[in-house]
Amino acid sequence: MSGLVDGKWVGTDYATDEDGAFQRQETTFRDRIGPDEAFPVEAGRYHLYICRACPWAHRAAMTRALKGLDDAISLSLVQPERYDQGWEFSEAHSDPLYGESHLRDIYVRADPDYTGRVTVPVLWDRKSETIVNNESEEIMRMLDVAGDEMATQDVDLYPKGYRETVDRLIDDIYTPINNGVYRAGFADSQAAYDRAVDELFDALDHYDDLLADQRYLAGDRLTEADLAMFATLVRFDHVYHTHFKCNRRAIHEYDNLWGYTKDLYTTPGIERTVNMDHIVRHYYVSHGDVNPKRLVPTGPDIDFTEGHDRDRLPGGPPEALVE
Ligand SMILES: N[C@@H](CCC(=O)N[C@@H](CS)C(=O)NCC(=O)O)C(=O)O
């Protein structure tokens, strides 16, 4: 067990099963914001705690940026390096609500007897002073759908007619890709690593083929599924390729995934959510068991803003985003 047990900090070890395969624990705060939900839609009421390094938190941050929710939902960062006390606030990245020193203090404020991991993202309710939700997929959906009322940009990332496909895609990419890089990186046995890497690259090959003829995962529209995919792809060559030993191929070597990654990166609103310095510092410094000397590699030399050829395909970013 790691994280908090009955509100007491017990450490940051990751769990693997008897075959050495990484086990991600379920998140526990699963309430919703919405017209008929326990938490009403109200601008200025909610706060997002994230780390710019975290791919799960990144989904929520991208949704907030694309929909123009900056004024409606405040956001703050934790320090990217995470040591044995878990996520910390710092002078550069302080807790704007309570001035706490660690993110675990926020969890304990929500539930003094909390047992579970202390993860980002956290969606906090200022009014009832509790955590609404700490599951990124659900936060992304809430900001997208319930957040519509507060949005300043007309961007719908879960459009009618695409919803089943978006839900299926988010599920389909989770195990082999989003969590697949972690299954490779945190594997405790060769067999578990081999299995994760095989599944990861089979899936990447599949989506590289799919993206030969369509601009986005669900077709011609940018959706939540693309945000989920992008959060992994943008970290891949700098981190997962080396640190998590996913080195069969780099994303910039794929015919279509590379153009797709650059297309999303240069979609107005996305670039400001990517902090590559925080990304590389977090992974290489925080996982002492994976990288004991905590040295941060200098490469690769790739440019997410160089041109791409994705506008040859039908569709494109929502009109509201195109300057
Ligand atoms: N299922 C959660 C997972 C979030 C998660 O694992 N976040 C990582 C950072 S990338 C974290 O905070 N890890 C700290 C820990 O597990 O102790 C979600 O998608 O929101």
Image: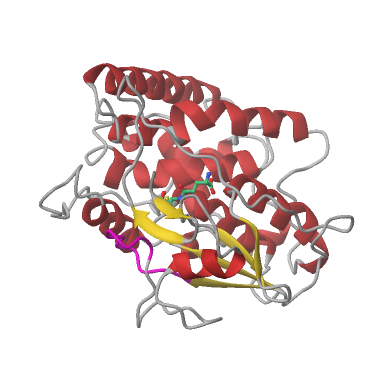
Magenta region: 77-87
* Front residue of 311 and 71: 71
Nearer to me, 148 or 217: 148
Residue 217 to residue 106: above or below: above
Q: Is residue 46 left or right of residue 309?
A: right
Task: Depth check: give the residue in front, 82 or 243.
Answer: 82
Q: Residue furthest left?
A: 293
Q: What residue do we see at 22% from left, 47% from top?
A: 300
| Between 232 and 174, the one nearer to me in the picture | 174
Q: State the predominant SS element of the stretch in magenta.
A: loop
Compared with residue 69, is residue 99 higher up or lower down, i.e. above or below?
A: below
* The residue positioned farthest toward the right in the image shown: 36
Residue at (34, 56) in percent of width and height:
279
Decide if residue 82 is in sight here: yes
Image coords of residue 78 (percent x, y): 41, 68
Tell me the quadrant of the picture where the C terminus can be found.
Answer: bottom right
Instruction: Give the side of residue 250 with respect to residue 102, left or right.
Output: left
| Residue 240 pos. (x, y %) | 30, 40
**Residue at 76%, 35% in the rendered image:** 163
**Snapshot quadrant of residue 21:** top left
Compared with 289, 11 (above or below) is below
Q: Is residue 268 visible?
A: no
**Which of the 4 quarters of the picture holds residue 84?**
bottom left
Q: Quadrant of the N terminus?
A: top left
Residue 135 percent location from the top left of the image: 59, 49
Tell me what residue is drawn at x 28 percent, y 31 percent: 246
Q: Is residue 290 left or right of residue 212?
A: left
Q: Is residue 129 magenta?
A: no
Residue 309 percent coordinates (x, y): 48, 39
Residue 82 on the magenta segment: yes
